[in-house]
Amino acid sequence: MDALEIGKAIAAGRLTAVAALEAAFLRIDARDKDVGAWQAIDRDQAFANAAARDREQPRSPLHGVPVGVKDVLDTADLPTAYGSPIYAGARPLADAACVALLREAGLVVIGKTVTTEFAMRTPGKTRNPHNLAHTPGGSSSGSAAAVGDGQAPLAIGTQTSGSVIRPAAFCGAVGFKPTWGTVPRAGLKMLAESLDVIGAMATTPAAAHALVQAMAGATIDPAAPAASPPRFGICHTAAWPTVEHASAAALDEAADRARQAGATVVDVELPTPFGKALDAHDIVMTYEARRMLAHERTRHWDALSPAFQAVLERGAAASDADYRQALDVRAECRATLAEAFRSVDVLLTPAAPGEAPEGLAFTGSPDFNRIWTFAGAPCVTVPGLTGPKGLPVGVQIIGMLGDDARAIAAAGWLHALLH
Amino acid sequence: MDALEIGKAIAAGRLTAVAALEAAFLRIDARDKDVGAWQAIDRDQAFANAAARDREQPRSPLHGVPVGVKDVLDTADLPTAYGSPIYAGARPLADAACVALLREAGLVVIGKTVTTEFAMRTPGKTRNPHNLAHTPGGSSSGSAAAVGDGQAPLAIGTQTSGSVIRPAAFCGAVGFKPTWGTVPRAGLKMLAESLDVIGAMATTPAAAHALVQAMAGATIDPAAPAASPPRFGICHTAAWPTVEHASAAALDEAADRARQAGATVVDVELPTPFGKALDAHDIVMTYEARRMLAHERTRHWDALSPAFQAVLERGAAASDADYRQALDVRAECRATLAEAFRSVDVLLTPAAPGEAPEGLAFTGSPDFNRIWTFAGAPCVTVPGLTGPKGLPVGVQIIGMLGDDARAIAAAGWLHALLH
């Protein structure tokens, strides 16, 4: 059952919020020692919240559904550490806006999921649930692993480079990064303000869409899968030279099966400004991160990982003029992106170079994700295929800016085809 | 001396940071009982910081300069209450990014300045320093009053409707709201994420620009006043029917003196989408505020003022479709704003309907400010004129999106003319 089906069962009285939470904890208890998706859990409090929801009329289609909250989001009733020893045991003053909004919609917070340090590269304790010797990806490591492992039907992720789409692909979850600006960010520990997006992990695109709507305080009205086969544009992007066989083959297979099911699949070239997007994204991210984390940089430098220090130092090397130029590149990307959608509904690309890399030190390359985050476009990981090592491989669907419902509908269509 | 002159004197050894802070406290001690600009001060800590700066080489042109911090910004070493009893005595986990950045630039925090409740309408204790029976304006009430009264050469303000430009005008300070997105907002208690801007109060446009650059972590390189007379476009806007004699006369006088000094002054009409901007701004602000303050709304409703509750209820009345339409209006405003600048460098309008209203309950109308905040354009309050009640009256200069340096240069030119 995806989260919407769980919500339906609860609304119909066939399931309770407490029973849905018990099911989550049954799986968590069996798997947490190995997977390590959770940073903080208060079981009594979670069950008390679930029981309270069971005494109410449903507030939304996700009423009573359990959800994991990435630990870069503030929670007043659970410790919040942002993946950094600086904040170990810290207790913020308030819930993040998106957490308060999903609680208002009746969802039940299971606990906080592991994040990399300030949502950059330095990993936490989480392992890939499909092979514990491999990374779950990052930075939304715990959220992707929890959903991919059946420990939670929903979890919150955030993306500044590829932190929702890539770990979802590695862990076999659906990841959804909506158009930039969709979900309010009050109470998010921001990394790069003009890039950071709050998104969702789920088991279907429709459920991920519903979670984003709940977190945005919008009416939950998830897009149904496309009624007729969508028009897909295969887009290799400048990251293509880094693609591994697993992702190239998955892209081919997804395209073939879509064609066989009646979809149009054509090749699409990106407008020329996108040729500068990978470099410009890095300048914007590091320049902003250096400033966004100024308190930690100036007061707690020695408590930052060497990898994070290196990001902040890259941000110092970028001049104000470099940053303004990079913002100009982004404005050009945004202004021309629609050209890529002239004859297609959505773009189809790899979600990551290949399967999850072996080892836990490296969360994998976000180079198939960064240009879309940079442009602000909605992206969806569609899982369902498997690589040569037996690990999940996802494909990525990209929509036009603000055209999230169409991207979700196409993802839902493809997801059904691959399952 | 403006903040840049103070910084120069400190760098030259003619002044110390401690002496600059002593001068500020001399005025604060004489006036605080009446004006009430300050929410929280830790004098020992402020002097310790100033003494530490005096032992260093200057880190920036504002090294050693005292600054007030609006109490909607987090400070780890001073209580932060956001103007709400919910957070009385609260101590955040970290400094806001802009506070850490100005400390890195060597500025010395005097203390926290009074804000209205969550930067909306419900006022704090501050009075207008030019007449204690009148409002200082809001929401940056304490920052405007402190700078307008000579208690601080610099202070931080924030604007979602007219919360920098209007109180600066009422208190006789320079207010500068830069282009949306200029100053990082980590650690700002956000009210409406797509509108909120962090800006500056100072005694000259150049000093306000320098503070914004410091808060953005950019090189401090303030625009010099325009060498040749700027081209001004007088723009009455849809708020003109509410203008009072004081502001209409001040606009005429500023225009006349600019013309006499060789400036071009022409009338400018705004592109048609701006006709919908006042209504659309209110929808965006209230829709977002309802979601941004979801924690306070769902957990602390009874601790919110009736006026703030009414804002959140207006936000509930706006549908998702209303909000999307309002965002479309904004996109049209942004896309067409440049048309108003075809033959002028900057626009010139009232900064407020008139002088500061009598009484402390109403902080004044932001209707001469909201459309510019909505479009994201840079705005500067230029004080120097006086109304029939003897209170300060400011005019407002507006620049094209991203053209902050030109707006500051024109404001500097006009400011010099009016002083």
Image: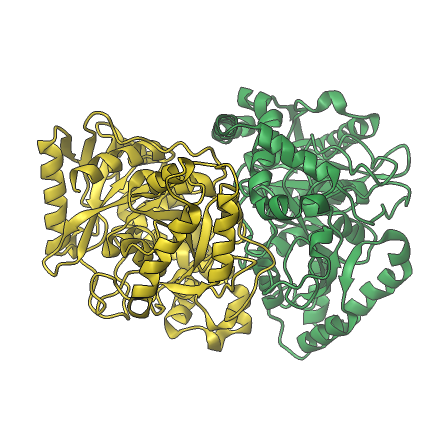
Chain colours: A yellow, B green
State the image quarter where residue A270 is shown.
Answer: top left
Residue B105 appears in the figure: yes
Eyeballing the image, is B400 above or below B25? above
Residue A78, percent across and down? Answer: 52, 61
Which residue: 70% across, 53% down?
A: B86
Residue B250, percent across and down? Answer: 79, 31
Residue B226, percent across and down? Answer: 63, 43
Eyeballing the image, is A340 above or below B55? above
Who is closer to the viewer here, A298 or A47? A47
Residue A308, percent across and down? Answer: 40, 68
Who is closer to the viewer here, A46 or B262? A46
Q: Is residue A112 left or right of residue B379?
A: left
Q: Is residue B400 left or right of residue B380?
A: left
Q: Quadrant of the N terminus of chain A?
A: top left
Question: How many labels sit on residues?
Answer: 0
Which residue: 72% across, 61% down?
A: B89
Residue furthest front as drawn? A14
Residue B179 appears in the figure: no
Q: Is residue A389 left or right of residue B93?
A: left
State the image quarter where residue B60 is shown.
Answer: bottom right
Eyeballing the image, is B409 above or below A190? above
Q: Quadrant of the C terminus of chain A?
A: top left
Which residue: 39% across, 63% down?
A: A38
Q: Is residue B134 left or right of residue A265?
A: right
Who is closer to the viewer here, A130 or B405? A130
Residue furthest bottom as drawn? B55
State the image quarter where residue B51 is shown.
Answer: bottom right
